[in-house]
């Protein structure tokens, strides 16, 4: 190869003066960061844990829980604005009663699971999507696997039955 071949300019052969110098990056500032939405930033901050003193001892809560605790405490102390917020939230969700499973509910769930055993074995079981509409309802877990004891088979049934996954 001659010096003349090194000086040729063309496809995949940029001019010598415009080539990157050794040790020089082709993208010196790097890829620009993605702009996060305000909602994503608020959710991220609310999920951070903080240490608080309550009753002489230190407790760890998420900022979300600390915010609710402070809001309720200010409402109880007579501050009108937090009182209106808490009462409006209670009014909005007054019809929602906490669910307590009975033996009949458990039996119905077990019947439904056993009847769909064939579809579970084939991997075609239906999935259940759970959405939390309220900002304060985020569960403290990222994954929940419901395990059941199946008396007819004498074993514990786990993962193929019900798996809840929550986005963080």
Image: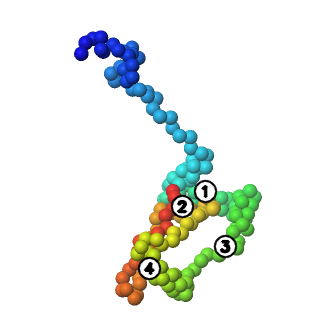
Q: Nearer the viewer, mark 3 or mark 2?
A: 3
Q: How far apart are marks 3 and 2 (CA)?
A: 30 Å
Judge by depth and name the residue closer to the eye, 139 or 162: 162
Residue picked out by circle 3: 96
Q: Distance between the residues labelled 4 and 2?
A: 49 Å
Most extreme residue toward the top is: 4
Classed neighbour count for the residue bearing mark 4: other residues with Cα under 10 Å, few (<14), some (14–19), many (≥20): some
60, above or below 113, in the image: above
Q: Is residue 78 visible?
A: no
Classed neighbour count for the residue bearing mark 1: other residues with Cα under 10 Å, few (<14), some (14–19), many (≥20): some
Classed neighbour count for the residue bearing mark 2: other residues with Cα under 10 Å, few (<14), some (14–19), many (≥20): few
Secondary structure beneath disc 3? Answer: loop
Q: How far apart are marks 3 and 1 (CA)?
A: 22 Å
Secondary structure beneath disc 1? Answer: helix
The answer to whether mark 3 and mark 1 are in CB contact below 8 A is no
Sequence-wise, the earlier of marks 3 and 1 is 1
Q: Distance between the residues labelled 4 and 3?
A: 32 Å
Judge by depth and name the residue closer to the eye, 12 or 102: 12
Residue picked out by circle 1: 67
Judge by depth and name the residue closer to the eye, 36 or 10: 10
Q: Distance between the residues labelled 1 and 4?
A: 44 Å
Q: Which residue is drawn at 70% across and 71% down?
A: 94
Residue picked out by circle 2: 54
Image position, residue 10 (x, y; %): 39, 19
Q: Residue at x 54, y 69 (%)?
A: 128
Q: Nearer the viewer, mark 2 or mark 1?
A: 1
Q: Which of the 4 quarters of the picture holds residue 67?
A: bottom right
Q: Which of marks 1 and 4 is in front?
A: 4
Sequence-wise, the earlier of marks 2 and 1 is 2
Residue picked out by circle 4: 117
Q: Which residue is drawn at 55% across and 81% down?
A: 101
Sequence-wise, the earlier of marks 4 and 2 is 2
């Amino acid at each position: 190869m001659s010096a003349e071949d090194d000086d040729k300019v063309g496809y995949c052969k940029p001019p010598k003066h415009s080539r990157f110098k050794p040790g020089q990056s082709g993208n010196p500032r790097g890829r620009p960061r993605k702009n996060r939405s305000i909602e994503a930033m608020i959710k991220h901050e609310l999920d951070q844990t903080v240490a608080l003193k309550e009753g002489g001892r230190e407790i760890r809560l998420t900022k979300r829980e600390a915010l609710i605790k402070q809001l309720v405490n200010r409402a109880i102390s007579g501050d009108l604005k937090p009182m209106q917020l808490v009462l409006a939230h209670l009014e909005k969700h007054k019809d929602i009663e906490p669910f307590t499973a009975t033996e009949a509910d458990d039996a119905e769930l077990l019947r439904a699971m056993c009847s769909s055993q064939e579809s579970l074995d084939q991997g075609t079981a239906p999935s259940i999507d759970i959405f939390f509409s309220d900002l304060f309802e985020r569960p403290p877990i990222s994954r929940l696997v419901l395990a059941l004891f199946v008396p007819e088979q004498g074993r514990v049934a786990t993962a193929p039955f019900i798996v809840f996954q929550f986005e963080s």
